[in-house]
Image (spheres, rainbow, N blue to C red):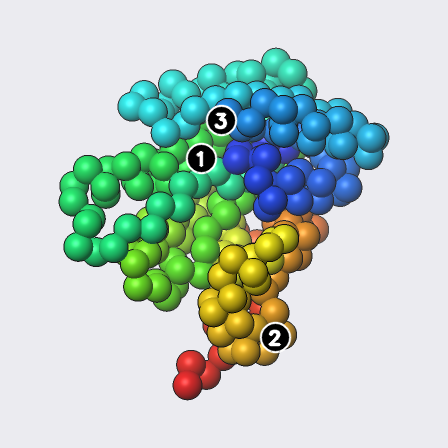
Amino acid sequence: MSRHALVTGATGGLGRALCRALAETGCDVTVHHRSDAAGAALLADDLRRLGRRAAVVAQDLAVDDVDAACAALLDAAERELGPVDVVVANASSQELTPWADLDAVAWDRLYSGTLRHTASLIHAAARRMTPERRPAIVVVGSIEGFRPAPGHAAYAVFKAAANALVAAAAQELGRRGVRVVGVAPGLIERPGLAEEWPDGHGRWSQTVPLGRPVTPDEVAAAVAFLASPAASGVTGTTLVVDAGWSAAPGW
């Protein structure tokens, strides 16, 4: 039985790796994007070359009627590839705002771009899933949900809330056969990062046990495992993928 995975925010570096990893484990993939139609089309072609079916759906999730937006996204995915068995909630804004500038408007904007549509998508997707297809929902969070950095307050707060969302949803959806898990990446390597942010990249690499950031493929491999039947006993937890940053002594 082919499984159908929906990946939100699929056209960024991590999103592309997530789609490839899921395709390589046998999933057909719906590629979600907000405004990168060209990137989504190229990614879908790549997935088809791997022998999987792929569809592209454009949908803005940071909207007032988020429930309708999530329903429309799922409707479109189902029309293209059938019932959705795996949802990877990867779409998220990352606006870094100093504490002094975090007024109510900024908090609402960050909430709309992160936690709000994640919660709505979990709610809508779980209602359509059937236990026979061994469904799973994976929420992509961040290590900042465990330890915030200066200037990242709102982002960190909503990523911490995402960890609680995973646990709470898992408690209520488990008896319906739906697993809910999270993955919290650390600093993710990308081309040019060391040149653009030499201080941060260097401090990270000196601090973590593996001596480097994680790669998109490493995070994607963790997500693909958690979404698979091989992880059928895992729910309600968030797996940290951070090159050992959480284990570093901090001094």
Q: Earlier in the sequence, mark 3 or mark 2?
A: 3
Q: Tag 3: Cα neighbours inside 10 Å, few (<14), some, or many (≥20)?
A: some
- Quarter containing the C terminus: bottom left
- The label on residue 211 is 2
Which is more toward the observer, 94 or 122? Answer: 94
Determine whether the residue tagged by mark 3 lies in a helix, strand or loop: loop
Q: Gap between marks 3 and 2, in whole Å?
A: 34 Å
Name the residue tied to disc 3: 34
Q: Earlier in the sequence, mark 2 or mark 1?
A: 1
Question: Residue 155's x, y, as percent?
Answer: 34, 51
Question: Residue 13's x, y, as percent?
Answer: 60, 44
Identify the residue at the far top of this view: 79
* Closer to the eye: label 3 or 1: 3
Q: Tag 2: Cα neighbours inside 10 Å, few (<14), some, or many (≥20)?
A: some
Q: Is residue 241 above or below residue 63?
A: below
Please tell me which residue is depicted at 49% across the width and 26% down the height of the picture.
34
Which is more toward the observer, 18 or 225? Answer: 18
- Type of residue at label 3? Arg
Q: Quadrant of residue 114?
A: top left
Name the residue tied to disc 1: 122
